[in-house]
Amino acid sequence: MSSKRKLGAAYFGVALLTTTIMNRIVCAALGVVLFPVAALAQVATPLGPQLNIAHRGASAYAPEHTFYAYDLAMEMDVDMLECDLFLTRDEVPVCIHDTTVDRTSDGSGTVESFTLAELRELDFGGWFDPAFSGAQIVPFEEQLDCYLRHNGRMRFHVETKDSAGGRAEEVLVEVLRRKGLLDTGDLHTSTILMQSFDAASLERIKALAPSLPTAFLFAVPTSGPALLWYLTGSGADYIDAMAPNMAVLQLDPLVVQRFHAAGHDVHVWTVNDRETMDSALEMGVDGVFTNNPDVLRAAIDERGTGSSVEERANPLEFERGCPGVAGRVVSNQGPGDVWAPSPQDRGVVLVAAAGESPVDEPPQTKLPATDGVGSVRGGALDLAWLVLMLLAFSRHLGARR
């Protein structure tokens, strides 16, 4: 984005935020709503089809990050599957949310203290319901191969949970490179979308793989670069989408417009009830993380603002549990399938099954040189001081008009 566009977006964001702040101040003082901020938020439109993102799979109905949860999410016709990514002791990326296995298995200890083979000995389903006893950990590569074999248009929202000193990003990018999945489209079409609460992790990913789209996760910010991005609506160059939690949108509905004005999609987390889903969709968000993708599917379809059934291309019938894929990965070298961008449309096609040599190697993305992380200037921002500055700026604009 050019410097002029960024400056214009920043001015627009400041004006919107000033309106929000003025509204709250006046409402608090007079006990009435003079500026209908919620109504203003309702005019926002998404930048593309509103996405149904299965948070840890259909995790309201099946144990999170298992093939049970992912299968059910595909059955519920989602746009994207999520993977929270940790490295095992032998550096295999696996899908698990917590730092430890304690909550979601019959084992105890940090994920990084186990090898993949040791994690496969644990039960990741019985904690949720005895009907799911015996469910195993899912390596990231198996998640990819299983659901891309079912549907080459499936997309994946992948979060780096622990950078492991930068090693997690390196391993992840190498896995995706080996599989031909580094360069499969833009923010709205790429098979892989990376997300993190750690902006430095996203910066490392962009340095290693500039074609991978990224999303910055955050709750209500109070200081540092995240606060500046929230106030102006304009994030760093290595951030493509903003991913606030729903509390941010409820506090400041116009934040969606600020981010859109700066060219950022907005993916909100984690929304599980219909009323809140409707509110988020009305604000114009571009994607919603949910544990209840069936409820969200109905909400989006009733509005007519999502992708079509044909665009999602999820099969009505498929083999549950990923036979032939589940259990085959032994290291961060696979074995696994190789993919390439579809020549007809978005999505990917299978170039070579695990153990085969591809006829045509998928295009590789060259790694650029990087001078490390830290190009974004931060520092604590005094929110009260900033509010006063915004009010002053608003008065100045009024005087100029």
Image (cartoon, grey):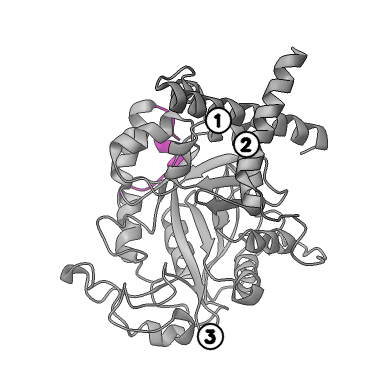
Q: Is residue 395 above or below residue 130?
A: above
Percent position (x, y) of residue 63?
28, 65
- Would residue 386 be visible to someone looking at this image? yes
- Amino acid at circle 3: Asp
Q: Determine whether, in the image, residue 259 is placed left or right of residue 147.
A: right
Q: Is residue 213 visible?
A: no
Question: Closest to the observer: 13 or 334?
Answer: 13
| Residue depicted at 31% across the width and 66% down the height | 321
Q: Is 160 a magenta residue?
A: no
Residue closer to the observer: 83 or 22: 22
Q: Please, which residue is most extreme toward the left here?
A: 130
Which numbered disc, 1 or 2, marks the residue that appears first in the sequence? Answer: 1
Looking at the rendering, the stretch of residues picked out in magenta corresponds to: 304-316
Q: Is residue 378 left or right of residue 325?
A: right
Mark 3 to mark 1 CA distance (whole Å): 50 Å
Query: In the image, residue 370 lies at what x, y percent?
Result: 81, 65
Tell me the residue that label 3 is attached to.
90
Q: Nearer the viewer, mark 3 or mark 2?
A: 2
- Badge 1 vs badge 2, beta-carbon distance below 8 Å: yes
Determine which residue is flagged by label 2. 387
